[in-house]
Image (cartoon, rainbow, N blue to C red):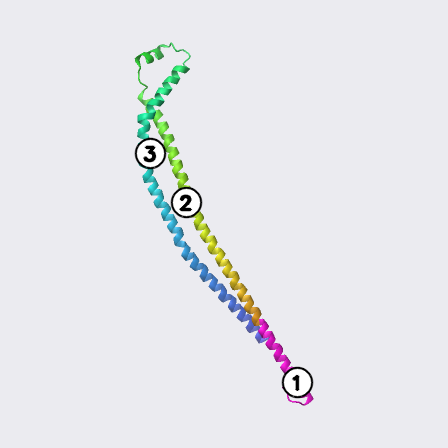
């Protein structure tokens, strides 16, 4: 293999190696730049979650007290009325005594009904808050993904541009070298013809 071809090949390999090293440095810089954003999003989400818990706890307690004071007696009254309507023997002694004495429903039944309703309210509030937190988390994750995708596309475009430039430079170098070698061959051929004809080469 001629020495010029070896040099040309070594030069191309060196240029490609240099271009790849630049791309790797650029990728590392982008990774270092985007890393803090992910940490910041995680920290903000933790703070928001803590604030949401602090906001929800007193409201749940207030809701439980209101249920115990307002809803539980109404539920007890509705259950009592339903029992009167459903009873197949309305003249029973126990029911008559209950009607005449107007005894209140046992406290255990009231507490149980209030607990069930309070549990349902708490569950619905927690589910609503969790859904909003999940949506917020998803939004942060989508933003981080979009930033990473954008950076990757930029890196790919720069890599493509650098590779194209390297190829063009290699082609230009090859054309220049080929033209010089043809000119050298023509000059040598002209000198040989001149010697054969006994004339000095131009």
Position in image of residue 135 (x %, y %): 42, 42
Question: Label 3, on which residue?
Answer: 60
Residue located at (51% from left, 64% from top) = 162
User: Quick check: is 199 in the magenta stretch?
Assistant: yes
Question: For the magenta stretch, what is the residue range?
Answer: 174-202
| Mark before the other along the chain sequence, 2 or 1 | 2
Q: In this view, does 78 lie to the left or right of 172?
A: left
Position in image of residue 70 (x %, y %): 32, 25
Position in image of residue 136 (x %, y %): 41, 44
- How many neighbours does mark 1 have within 10 angstroms: few (below 14), some (14-19), or many (20 or more)? some
- Asked if marks 2 and 3 touch (Cβ < 8 Å), the reply is no
Q: What separation in Å lies between label 3 and label 1 (alpha carbons)?
A: 105 Å
- How many neighbours does mark 2 have within 10 angstroms: few (below 14), some (14-19), or many (20 or more)? some
Question: Label 2, on which residue?
Answer: 137
Question: Label 1, on which residue?
Answer: 192
| Mark before the other along the chain sequence, 2 or 3 | 3
Residue located at (32% from left, 30% from top) = 64
């Amino acid at each position: 293999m001629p020495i010029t071809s070896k040099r040309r090949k070594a030069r191309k390999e060196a240029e490609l190696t240099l271009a790849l090293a630049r791309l790797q440095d650029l990728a590392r810089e982008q990774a270092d730049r985007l890393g803090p954003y992910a940490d910041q999003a995680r920290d903000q989400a933790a703070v928001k979650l803590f604030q949401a818990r602090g906001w929800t706890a007193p409201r749940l307690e207030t809701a439980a007290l209101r249920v115990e004071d307002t809803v539980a007696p109404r539920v007890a009254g509705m259950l009592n009325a339903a029992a009167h309507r459903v009873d197949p023997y309305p003249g029973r002694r126990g029911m008559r005594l209950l009607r005449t004495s107007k005894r209140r429903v046992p406290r255990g039944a009231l507490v149980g009904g209030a607990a069930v309703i309070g549990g349902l309210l708490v569950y619905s509030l927690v589910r609503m808050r969790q859904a909003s937190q999940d949506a917020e988390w998803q939004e942060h994750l989508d933003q981080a993904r979009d930033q990473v995708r954008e950076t990757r596309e930029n890196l790919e475009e720069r890599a493509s541009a650098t590779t194209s430039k390297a190829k063009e430079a290699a082609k230009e170098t090859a054309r220049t070298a080929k033209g010089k070698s043809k000119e050298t061959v023509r000059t040598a051929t002209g000198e040989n013809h001149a010697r054969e004809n006994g004339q000095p080469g131009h």
